[in-house]
Structures are given as C-alpha cells and as structure tokens.
Image: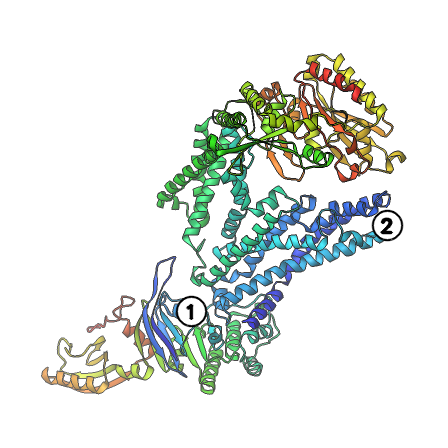
C-alpha cells in the first residue's frame, strides 16, 4: 500500500512548484497509470516515491514506512527513471551482479529468462547497445530484482512495437505472478489503457483524476445522435456538453455522467423543443480523449471549440 | 548496513581501477624514478663513506630516499608529491560523488537501497583506498628497486629504510602522507558535495585550502607597507590564522618534521570536514544538480572571501607598481573587487549581467573588505595587543642570557643558571618605559632601519650590542606570571634613551651578581673572526680556529687587511662568491671533508655541494691576504669567484632567516633600492651568536675550548659562542683583536 499524503515539492533553484498537496492512495497489486501534461510533476512524484527526492511537506508512506533513506524498504522498490543510467564499459551480466548485491531477491533465473526472451546478449558491452535495447536492459534488471513496487517513468518510450508488446506482457505476467504494485507514467496513453487499472491524472502539480479506469470510462462518453427538426441552438442546460460537432442531423459531443442519465435528459430536452431523437449511441472514450477532455479548461489545449456549423 | 557499505566499496574499487592505475603511474614517475636516478649517481659515494657507516646511510636515506613518502618535507620530490596529494584529494571525491551532479546518475544511485550515510562512508573508505593502494605499490617499487640497485653496489639499503635520524622510518613517513591525504580528501569530499561541477568544487577546495596562505602572504606584504617591518607572527589575529591552517604549513612552508600541533590540526580538520561532508551527503537535495554551489550562504561566503583576497592583492600590487600611497591601495582594491565579483558571477551564475542585478552584494563585499582591512591594519600596528602596563602589574624584569650561552653555562657551572629576575623598582620602571618607548616608536614609525632580528626581545639585545659592554641578554617583563612581548623589531632613532634604560636594568645589583660568574669564567679560549655576516645568516654556523698555526696566520692576515685597507675601500668593496672545489684528500677522509676545509679556511660555507665536492663562501674583496690563505690550502683544488653586488648582498641578507629548529622566523624581500642604501648606511644585525659590522664585513665571536671537540663536527654543536663586547667602529675592532691576541 502506497500512501501519498499532502506531498508538495518546489524546485529550489527555479522556484517552480512541481507538486502541490498531492494525496493519492495506491492499493497493493494494482497497476496505476500516472498521466499528466509535460511538467505536470509525474517524474517528480516518482522520484519522491523512489526516495531520490525529499518532499517539502507531506509524507510518502509505503507499507507503513517512510521511504526516504529507508534502505530495507528500497530493496522492494525498483525505479526505472526516464533517463536510464549504466556504468561505463560494463555488460548486462555485470550490471546484474551489481543489482544482486543490493537487491537480495534478485533472481538470476528470471534474469536469464528475460534476457533470452528479449534476445539480448548479456556479455556485450552496454555502450554498444541502442537506446531501445538499453531500455530493455533496464526493464530486465528491474523485473529481475523481484520488487514489490515498480516505479516506471516513461519506460515503454523508445521500444519498438514488438518489444513494447512483449514488455507489457511481461509486466502483466509479473504483476499476476508476484502481486506487485506498479506505477506507470507515460505519455502514450494507449500503453496505460492496456495495463492500468487505476489512473491518476496530474496537472500543475495537482491531482485532477484519481479513479479506476472503469470508473473513468463509465463516467464520460462521446455521444452520437440523429435529431429530426433540431433546434437552432442545441444547448441542453442540464448537460455539460463539450466537443460538440454537427453535420446535418448528426450530432456528436462528449458529456459526463452515465449514458442512461444523459439519454434521459436529452429525450426530455427534445420533447420540450419539438424534436425527435431517431438515433442515439454512447461511445466509450479512449484514455487520450479523456485526458484531453479533463484538461479542456486548463488552457493547455482548445478542446471546447466544437463547431456547430462545420 | 555493513553489507551495503562493503558492496558499495567493492563496486567503487572495481569502477575505480583506471584511476588507481593513473595515480600509480604518476606517483611512480614522481617518486621512485627520480630516486633511482639520484641513487645511481650517489651510491658510489656511499661505498666510500668512512666512519659510522650506519650514520652515513641513515643520513643519506633521510635526505634522498625515504622522504619521498613524506609530503611534509621540503625536498625536490615533495613538491610533486604534495601536488599529487592535494590534487588527488579533490579529484577522487569528485569522481566518487559524481552522481550528485548528473540527473540520470542521481536517479540511479539515490534510488539504490543504501542510505546516503552508508554511501558516504563507503565512498570515503573507497577514496582512501584509491590513494593508499597506489602509494603502497609505489613504496614497494621504491624499496624493491633500491634494494636491487643497492645489491649491485654492495650497499645494504634495507637497513636504512627503517632508520633515519629525524624520523621513525618508512612507516612513519607513509603515515605522514596518509594523515595529510585524509585532510585533503575530507576537504575534497566537502567541496565536491557543495558544488555542481569541477570548477566550482575547485573554487571551494582552493578557497579553504589555499586561502590562508594567500591571506598570510598578503598580510606579510601589507605589514611591510604599513609598518616597514618584517612580520613576526606575534600578532593575535595573524598568529591564529597560522595555527588553524595545517595544510598551509605543509604545502607552503614545508615545515619538517610536522609538529604535534600540525598533526592535531590536521586530524581535527579531517574530522570536521568529514562530518560536514557526511551531513551534506545526507542533506544535499538531489534536485540541485544544476546549482553552482548548492547552499547560497556558502556561495556568498566564498564570494566575499575571494573578492576580499583579490581586492587585497590588487591594492598591494598597485602600491608596489606605482610606489604610491594608501590612495593607490584603495584604487587597486576597488578595481580588484569589481573584477573578482564579475569573474565569480560568471563562474557561479554563468551570467555577466548578474553583477548589475545584485549590486547590493558588491556593496556588501566592499563593506566586509573595509572592515577586515581595518582590523588587519590595527592588528599589524599592535593595537589589539599592547597596553602599557601599570607599575603594580609588573612582577619583575627578567634579564636572560642568550639560550646558547645559557646552555653552555648551565653545563659549565653545573647549576641552573641563565636568568636573572630583577624586581628592583628602578629596573621595573625602566622596563616599562623601554616597552612603552618601543611601542610608541613603532606606531610613530620612528625608526631608521630594518633590524633583522626574529624574536622580539633580541631587538633590545641588538640595540644594546651597539653600545653596551655586555649584550647577550634579553629583557623580559613579567606580568601575572606571563611574559609581555613587544611587537616589532626595529632599529630605533631614540638609541640614547634605550641606552639609558638598558643601563638602568643592567646596573641593578641583581644583574651584576648574576653576571659575575660569567665574567670570571676561565674557559675563554679565543676569538674567532668570520669573514662575512652573510655566512652567519646563510648557514647558521660560525667558524672556530683551533689550529694554532692557522689561527695565528689568519689573525695576522686579517689584521693586515684591516690595517692596510682604507675605510672607503672597506665600505665599498665588492664581495666575492667564492666556490672552492676540493678533492677527497686522504687527510680529510677520516672526518667530514667540508667541515675540515671550512675550518682550515677560517670561513663559513654558505652552501655545500657534496656531489661536486664544492663549497661556496663569501668574502670581501679587500681581504686579499685572506684570499691567498684560502688558495694555499692543500685541499683546495680550484677557486672560482664572482662579483657580488651590493644590492644582491643586501637582498641575500634580507631574504629569510630560520631558527636552528627550522622555524621560520622572518621572511622579507626588499626591492626598494633607496631603502637598501639607507639600510647600508647604518645597520646593525643582531643574531644569537654573531655580531656584525657590514661596513667592514666582519663578525666577531668568542668561543670556548671545550666546545670544539672532534665529535662536534657530527653533532652539529660545533660552535657555542659568547659575544663579548662589540666595537662600534673599525678602530675598535682592531683594538679588540689586539687586546685579545694574547688569549689565543
């Protein structure tokens, strides 16, 4: 169980407040997707979770213990930063030896399997590897340490589609096998959609969404409907409509709430405006769309500009 | 925790192999290689060493071989080893704590399951091993190499490796190196953890390590300017500046062997820097990898310190270049202040405009500079130290003989002897007046020459020597059981007043009683005349003529020189640097050759070059008879002489002086020609065992029979002079010689 309680962090040099009173609880054996805009504070949060940074205020408690300077607890945490680091003139096998010294649960057996599955030569110098291969090495070493908590900062970036799929599969099977808790930060929300069961969206250092993926997906839909005799201005008062587009009689928009409730409200609206819904279909949003929808008012992007006349 | 530390050390050692190899190579190039070269040249001389072979070997080892490992000594190789030691002290921590300076490595290392304290301890031990392993390898190479070379030449080197006259052997010397490396290393760790890149770390390291010596150097120069004096390190602020800077002693002054105080300082500072380093390692925010100096107060302190020293240096430089006044110092200081401020801002902020953004800091720097500068000037003038004591505060006045004379009399009279405590009111009052006058003249700069006397109260001795019959005494004023020391060594204008005050003290019954046994001593054997004051200062030894024939010849030659030469000739005669090349003659092989030769020559060598078999002496040109006497010496193979200009002569005199235990007493170089000429007009040099008249290039000493034994050549207690009466003019000198001629 990871409890992030009121954590704030300001970078001393730039005075930028990266995290602002963040409170998140992450259950054991879950895969949490950490999403946010660039500079939202995802990497900072992961570094605090890994015990690299200290929070200015608030606490990060993992299994009831503070993580900073807690070497016993850190033995159960593998942190995969966005910029990988390996020693100069070393091989994957030598790195494995290094990991073994600090992570008592490190499994050479699992390491061997992963190396073989990823098709890497463990005796080749790492400085001759490509960026993607180094990323694979990072994943192999992190998983072989058999951690209880895996903190991944944009880990799948730089992997080719095949390796990405394989790495995802390994992550899934690792979690299934060991019951580990994974926190995944990525800009590629399709990756998170496949893996995560819980999403935390951070913006400007604050938590915007902290819900399970199912919750999120059942709470906002894109609707497509065909209206006979539509009103000049289609703006139902009791529905928070965004991304409204209109092509003839076909209306498309996003609205929060359950699909049943929204449909009922729309039918009531049509009755009062002398129009008829001839076709109505709620469509699940992708995580990308949810991300854009949630941040539509933050000034990052223009997401509300649905053009009725387009 | 222990397991983590050991694993981290193991990792560090594996990844630091290349650094250790580089260090080993550098150490080998700077250590054993030149040692082998020297050894191969000199080893044959060892085979011919006569007398106590062990002593010769030990002496040789001490001067050539073993000190390779002792960075505190001052020989040729130590410069390199000191630099290696200091450089390694920064480079190694910089390598070990690299992960604080880069984002990717910080993420990796700081997320490892090892606490920062453990990592610091592991790094500290690893860094120590990085240095020790190459040192041990170099030591083994040296010992093995020398043994092999020694066996070729039938010299057993192994016995000298653990036997040295001044040290406790190889292990102790390596211990020295280790102690001082630890000091540098702890400081380096602190610097590396305070900074984000090499340049900044170098700024921190350099500031803390070398700031004191730069500071002291400038203070010394300032003291000359403000006080026209040679600093004697007796000022409270300056003294403590020196005491708390052990590395300064080691690297710059080459203090050898280090004192217990130096070791204590080194260890205390090692612990202090080490603990601060550990604290920084624990507390340093990982996200500050891009900050120049991670803590702003430290940065500002460094900035102020640097600005101060540069401004100080610039001020003095302007003064020297322009021969200007205090205004020039201020102009130079302002320029230096602004320049240093801009440069440091470029280093720390990487922004030239930063100075304009934060002008208040410049104002602060100027303010701090002004305050410290005023404090230093006040310290130089003794304002913090001297207060004229009340009569009731003075317990008694000590009149003490010169320590060498005391030692002699203590032995000769078989009793404790040497200090006369005088509590007669008139003597106490005279002492107070003496001290007060002394300080008054310092503050008024009322003096007309620089007196090169290192210890304070020898000043009085020297002044007294110019006019009083018995002058080998120091006057101390005791207050609450502690000695009151005056500050400066001057030759003052108010000589007559000093004379009267001294006379009052010396005329006291207690002092006369005290002196009678000395005056009645029957051990006086003869007068020794040395040819040049420079020799006394250069080598710190005098000459004893104990050979009757040679003694008479030399005295006659000297008297002839005096009688025949004109005053102007004597005053203006050039001095010769005389290089005497001698052969390893049978006659001298049973003893120390150069000691025998100089004894026969009746002069003192300023420099021995054993390998060349040469001695350098300096004699006045007008001493033609003396010169011919030297030439007629059977051991002398060749004479080379060169003109020694008056400026060189005076510069040579004023360069430096060391006490017999190696303590630096005073240092000064005077380049003002007008000043030198003034000094030449009327200068008196006082030194513990010689009395000098530069106008005549003559030093007169009295020696005693028993002291000049054969053993004294080796135990370096060859001369135990008592100075007895100084003629104030040339005629007095001649009269003095004639009066004592029957004593020979």
Label annotation for residue B153: 2
Q: Residue at x 54, y 48 (%)?
A: B209
Q: Using the rendered image of the protein, determine whether residue B350 is visible from the camera's viewpoint.
A: no
- Mark 2 and mark 1, same subunit? no
The residue that mark 1 highlights is A47
Q: Nearer the viewer, residue B242 or B551?
A: B551
Q: Position of residue A242 (x, y in %)?
A: 22, 75
Q: Is residue B123 above or below residue B2?
A: above
Which coloring applies here? rainbow
Judge left or right: residue B153 versus residue B502: right
Q: Residue at x 47, y 74 (%)?
A: A74
Extreme residue toward the right, this view: B586
Q: Is residue A52 above or below residue B453?
A: below
Q: Position of residue A158 (x, y in %)?
A: 47, 72
Q: Nearer the viewer, residue B398 or B680?
A: B398
Q: CA distance from mark 2 to mark 1?
A: 66 Å
Label annotation for residue B349: none
Q: Using the rendered image of the protein, determine whether residue B23 is visible from the camera's viewpoint.
A: yes
Q: Position of residue B309 (x, y in %)?
A: 48, 40
Secondary structure state at the residue bearing disc 2 = loop
Judge left or right: residue B89 versus residue B522: left
Q: Residues within 10 Å of mark 1 (few under 14, many from 20)?
A: many
Q: Nearer the viewer, residue A1 or B485?
A: B485
User: In which image quadrant can residue A151 be found?
Assistant: bottom left
Q: Nearer the viewer, residue B169 or A224?
A: B169
């Amino acid at each position: 169980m990871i409890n992030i309680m009121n954590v704030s962090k300001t970078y001393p040099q730039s005075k930028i407040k990266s995290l602002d009173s963040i409170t998140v609880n992450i259950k054991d054996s879950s895969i949490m997707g950490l999403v946010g805009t660039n500079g939202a504070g995802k990497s900072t949060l992961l570094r605090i979770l890994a015990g690299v940074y200290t929070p200015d205020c608030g606490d990060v408690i993992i299994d009831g213990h503070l993580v900073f300077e807690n070497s016993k607890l850190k033995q159960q945490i593998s942190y995969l930063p966005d910029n990988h680091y390996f020693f100069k003139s070393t091989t994957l096998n030598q790195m494995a030896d290094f990991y073994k010294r600090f992570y008592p649960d490190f499994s050479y057996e699992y390491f061997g399997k992963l190396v073989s599955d990823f098709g890497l030569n463990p005796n080749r110098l790492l400085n001759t590897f490509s960026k993607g291969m180094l990323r694979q090495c990072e994943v192999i070493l992190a998983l072989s340490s058999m951690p209880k908590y895996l903190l991944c900062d944009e880990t799948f970036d730089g992997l080719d589609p095949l390796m990405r799929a394989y790495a995802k599969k390994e992550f899934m099977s690792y979690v299934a096998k060991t019951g580990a808790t994974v926190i995944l930060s990525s800009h590629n929300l399709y990756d998170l959609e496949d893996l995560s069961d819980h999403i935390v969206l951070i913006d400007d250092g604050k938590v915007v969404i902290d819900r399970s993926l199912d919750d999120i997906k059942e709470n906002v839909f894109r609707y497509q409907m065909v209206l006979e005799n539509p009103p000049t201005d289609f703006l139902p008062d009791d529905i928070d409509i965004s991304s409204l587009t209109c092509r003839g009689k076909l209306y498309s928009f996003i609205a929060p709430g359950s699909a049943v409730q929204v449909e009922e409200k729309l039918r009531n609206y049509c009755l009062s405006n002398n129009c008829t819904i001839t076709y109505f279909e709620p469509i699940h949003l992708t995580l990308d769309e949810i991300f854009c929808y949630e941040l539509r008012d933050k000034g990052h992007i223009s997401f509300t500009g649905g053009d009725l006349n387009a | 925790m222990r397991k983590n530390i050991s694993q981290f050390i193991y990792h560090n050692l594996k990844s630091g192999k290349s650094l250790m190899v580089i260090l080993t190579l550098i150490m080998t190039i700077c250590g054993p290689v030149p040692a082998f070269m020297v050894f191969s040249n000199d080893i044959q001389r060892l085979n011919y060493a006569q007398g106590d072979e062990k002593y010769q070997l030990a002496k040789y080892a001490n001067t050539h071989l073993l000190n390779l490992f002792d960075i505190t000594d001052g020989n040729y190789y130590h410069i390199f080893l000191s630099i290696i030691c200091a450089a390694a002290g920064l480079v190694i921590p910089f390598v070990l704590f690299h992960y604080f300076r880069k984002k990717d490595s910080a993420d990796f290392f700081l997320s490892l399951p090892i606490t920062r304290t453990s990592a610091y301890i592991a790094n500290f031990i690893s860094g120590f091993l990085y240095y020790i392993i190459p040192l041990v390898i170099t030591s083994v190479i040296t010992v093995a190499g020398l043994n092999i070379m020694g066996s070729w030449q039938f010299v057993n080197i192994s016995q000298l490796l653990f036997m040295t006259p001044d040290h406790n052997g190889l292990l102790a010397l390596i211990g020295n190196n280790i102690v001082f490396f630890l000091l540098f290393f702890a400081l380096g760790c602190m610097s590396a953890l305070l900074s984000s890149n090499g340049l900044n770390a170098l700024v921190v390291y350099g500031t803390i390590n070398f700031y004191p010596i730069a500071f002291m150097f400038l203070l010394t120069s300032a003291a000359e300017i403000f006080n026209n004096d040679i600093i004697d390190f007796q000022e409270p602020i300056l003294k403590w500046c020196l005491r708390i800077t052990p590395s300064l002693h080691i690297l710059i002054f080459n203090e050898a062997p280090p004192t217990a105080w130096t070791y204590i300082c080194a260890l205390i500072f090692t612990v202090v820097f080490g603990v601060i380093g550990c604290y920084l390692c624990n507390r340093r925010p990982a996200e500050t990898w891009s900050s120049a100096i991670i803590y702003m107060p430290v940065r500002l302190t460094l900035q102020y310190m640097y600005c101060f020293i540069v401004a100080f240096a610039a001020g003095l430089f302007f003064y020297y270049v322009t021969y200007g006044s205090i205004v020039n110092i201020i102009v130079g200081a302002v320029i230096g202040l602004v320049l240093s401020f801009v440069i440091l801002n470029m280093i720390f902020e990487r922004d030239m405009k930063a100075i304009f953004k934060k002008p208040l800091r410049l104002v602060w720097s100027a303010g701090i500079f002004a305050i410290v500068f005023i404090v230093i000037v006040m310290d130089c003038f003794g304002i913090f130290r001297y207060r004229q004591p009340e009569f009731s505060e003075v317990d008694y006045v000590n009149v003490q003989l010169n320590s060498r004379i005391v030692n002699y009399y203590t032995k000769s009279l078989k009793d404790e002897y040497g200090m006369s405590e005088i509590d007669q009111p008139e003597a106490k009052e005279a002492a107070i007046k003496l001290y007060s006058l002394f300080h008054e003249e310092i503050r008024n700069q009322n003096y007309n020459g620089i007196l090169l006397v290192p210890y304070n109260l020898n000043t009085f001795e020297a002044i007294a020597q110019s006019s009083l019959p018995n002058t080998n005494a120091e006057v101390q004023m005791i207050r609450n059981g502690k000695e009151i020391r005056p500050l400066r060594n001057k030759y003052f204008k108010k000589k007559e007043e000093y004379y009267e005050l001294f006379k009052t003290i010396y005329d006291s019954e207690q002092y006369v009683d005290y002196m009678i046994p000395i005056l009645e001593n029957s051990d006086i054997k003869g007068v020794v005349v040395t040819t040049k004051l420079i020799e006394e200062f250069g080598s710190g030894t005098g000459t004893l003529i104990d050979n009757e024939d040679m003694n008479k010849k030399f005295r006659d030659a000297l008297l002839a020189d005096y009688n025949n030469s004109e005053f102007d000739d004597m005053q203006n005669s050039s001095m010769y640097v005389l290089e005497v090349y001698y052969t390893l003659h049978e006659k001298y092989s049973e003893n120390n050759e150069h000691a025998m030769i100089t004894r026969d020559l009746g002069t003192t060598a300023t420099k021995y070059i054993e390998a060349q078999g040469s001695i350098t002496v300096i004699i006045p040109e007008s001493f033609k008879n003396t010169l011919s006497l030297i030439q007629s010496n059977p051991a002398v193979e060749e004479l080379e002489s060169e003109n020694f200009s008056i400026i060189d002569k005076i510069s040579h005199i004023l360069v430096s002086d060391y006490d017999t235990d190696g303590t630096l007493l005073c240092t000064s170089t005077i380049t003002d020609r007008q000043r030198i000429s003034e000094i030449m007009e009327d200068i008196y040099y006082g030194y513990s065992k010689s009395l000098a008249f530069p106008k005549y290039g003559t030093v007169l000493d009295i020696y005693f029979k028993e002291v000049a034994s054969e053993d004294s050549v080796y135990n370096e207690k060859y001369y135990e002079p008592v100075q007895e009466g100084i003629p104030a003019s040339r005629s007095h000198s001649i009269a003095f010689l004639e009066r004592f001629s029957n004593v020979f």
